[in-house]
Amino acid sequence: MAKKDYYLEQPIVETLESNYMPYAMSVIVSRALPEIDGFKPSHRKLLYTMYKMGLLGGNLTKSANVVGQTMKLNPHGDAAIYETMVRLTRGNESLLVPFVESKGNFGKVYSRDMEYAAPRYTEVKLDKICNELFADIDNDSVDFVDNYDGKMKEPLLLPTAFPNILVNPNLGIAVGMACNICGFDLNEVCRTTIELLKNPEHDILSTLPAPDFPTGGEIIFNRSQMEEIYATGRGSFKVRSVWNYLKKERIIEVTQIPYTATAEAIIDKMTELIKAGKLKEVSDVRDETGLNGLKIAIDIKSGVDPDKLMQKLMKLTPLTDSFSCNFNVLIGGTPRVMGVREILEEWSAWRTECVKRRIHFDLSKKEARLHLLLGLKKILLDIDRAIAIIRETEEDAEVIPNLMMGFGIDQDQAEFIAEIKLRNINKEHILNRLTEVDNLEKDIKRLNGLLSDNKKVRALIIDELEKIIKKYPTQRKSAIIFEHEIEQYDETENIEDYPVSIFLSREGYFKKITPLSLRMGGEQKYKEGDGLRLTLQASNKQEIIFLTNKAQAYKTRLHEFDDLKASVLGDYLPQKLGMDEGEAPVFMFLPGDYSGHIIYLFENGKLAKIETKTYDTKSNRRRLTGAFSDKSPLAAVLHMPEEGEIAVYTQSRLLIFDTSIVTSKSTRTSQGVSAFALKRGQTVQAALPLAQADIKNPSRYRVRSLPGAGALIKEEDALEKQLELDV
């Protein structure tokens, strides 16, 4: 068999278009993204099945029964259908407005490990709010299509009488796109929609101040952030937990958490901090969730301020979490990211179309009824003649044609008259039918007036929304607090401050030693072949930055290191700070208020003077890449809080100059300027602040401009001697 028979050569672009794109579009359009009614196809199929089963106002039925019936519309399997149902139930608490009344264990949205019971053990029916989903479903208000095997019809959308797309949270992950819609209070959404229908320029934030979540919590309100989300459909905001303190028991109870967090994730993070020694204020943490709802109990030690502790926990654990918004909705089969105003405008336009279709359906039925009664009216003018025509007609098939010819009516009218019972040919029945004609004519005139006037249709939608507000009163579950009201956790506030001596060895071992331990500890201990690289005086609260041989900087604080004795090796920094393989520290400095400069001297004679503030970051990043230039091997590093003279050594020459003659750079990776005009075979070996060097005649080596060639080193000024003095 020829090799070409084993496979078909095809360009990768064609393969993606023919194989992957249909799958991607199916996921986007038919699975992951909600449409303007607020539902994904799986939600819609499940709820419509329950409606057809008579579960709107009926008795509860086993979930397994609903799952089985839903498979006639949704072929994705019973497990996927039941999982969809779980999220829609009141018991799971995933939605602000649940659509399924439930009995049994359906798990909880705020619990990662609480499993829902099997469908054979749980019972469900549609919640009362579903009356607002299905009220117009049989009035031709939405289109119906065939199900997957063509044996049933299902609605393309549900004619929701309120903007469900904004009421309930909705998360979907498609191919190359996703949606993440936060929930809003039902009454606030309805009120906002009413105001927008009355005035398109309405200030949305005045009636819809912030999102709302089933799990409660406190939304940290930032007006500019919220305005951006409302305008663009993208952005994020923070939600924090709600807690209370039992003073006698010294227990903090967390009763509400962010919608994106789980009780187990919060407890796991606290446990991790306790094990790492970063949460010494807590003696125990427990999950006490029960029939009364969520509860995380935190036992605190005596003397601990609960407010300060919670500030710390809010910063270090998921007790405060961000919700990232992405209001991606399918509009006419096309994904669109829209702001709140645009979504409500789209919903209003779609709902207007639904109401018009419902009105047109009612109008058609009334016109058909009126048409029949107008035929009856003609007959009633001479009822005896009609009876005679029917009596004298010999064949049954001729009754209808004879009535049509006798009174000038059409077939539908004749059929209606022929079906009238003999008992109904009385004065009362005849008068009632004539009255009905008058009423129908008035209704038809009113309905035609509605169809021709969009203002009247909007008024009808407003009236329906007002009724929903009265029928389903709600209260916000998530409180709103302003950013400036929150006292932020200061990591250094509760840290004990005291003087320390710090030591860095040549092989990367680090020790922090108190003055008392240093006086009593004796000789410093190092590994064989190792020795001191640098020592500094500091305080326990200070920040420290380590520079490495891979041109990276690692930022940390001294309080994160344990106080040690001189007799131990110390912390191995590559492991402690998570450095890359082969990476080792070469210098350390205390940035303080990030004033001054860092002086880098390279073997090729160049010098880079970098502003210390370039190492300051707004976020708490531990690692900074590109800490300095790696174009030439590093010979020496000096931290200069103020300008001053430095001494630079090669193998045989010495150069002294003031750092003020060098222009500082704001880019950390700058290669700098030529400082030492090197002789053949020479490289820069080291550098020291002049104040730390014991040079007998500095003027011999001093220059006023760079680059400089320096002068031959006299024996009393030799590099080895200076390094010994420095150590």
Image (spheres, rainbow, N blue to C red):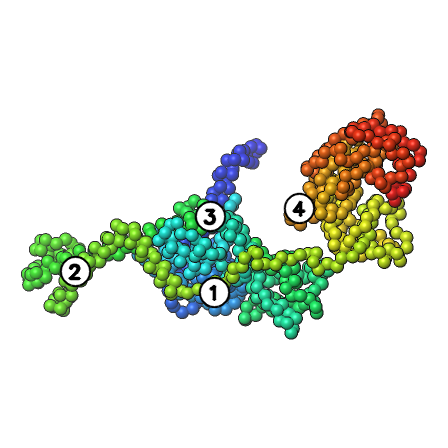
Q: Residue at x 10, y 59 (%)?
A: 379
Q: Position of residue 390 (x, y in %)?
A: 9, 61
Lower position in the chain sequence, tag 3 or tag 2? 3
Q: SS of the residue at dot 4? A: loop
Lower position in the chain sequence, tag 1 or tag 4? 1
Give, as a three-letter code, the residue at label 1.
Arg
Q: SS of the residue at dot 2? A: helix
Label 3 or label 2, whichever lies nearer to me, is 3
Label 2 or label 4, whichever lies nearer to me, is 4
Label 2 or label 1, whichever lies nearer to me, is 2
Mark 3 in CB contact with mark 4 (< 8 angstroms): no
Give, as a three-letter code, the residue at label 3.
Ala
Relative to the observer, which residue lies in front, 617 or 184?
617
Q: Determine the image quadrant of residue 465.
A: bottom left
Is 577 left, or right, of 31 in this rendering?
right
Give, as a three-letter code, the residue at label 4.
Thr
Relative to the observer, which residue lies in front, 352 or 409?
352
Q: Residue furthest bottom?
A: 248
Q: Residue at x 51, y 52 (%)?
A: 223
Lower position in the chain sequence, tag 1 or tag 3? 1
Label 1 or label 3, whichever lies nearer to me, is 3
Mark 2 → mark 4, Cα distance in angstroms: 80 Å
Mark 2 in CB contact with mark 1 (< 8 angstroms): no
Residue pointed to by mark 3: 231
Q: SS of the residue at dot 1? A: loop
Lower position in the chain sequence, tag 2 or tag 4? 2
Give, as a three-letter code, the residue at label 2.
Asp
Mark 2 → mark 1, Cα distance in angstroms: 48 Å
Q: Position of residue 86 (x, y in %)?
A: 49, 61
Mark 1 → mark 4, Cα distance in angstroms: 46 Å
Q: Residues within 10 Å of mark 3 (few under 14, many from 20)?
A: some
Residue pointed to by mark 4: 617
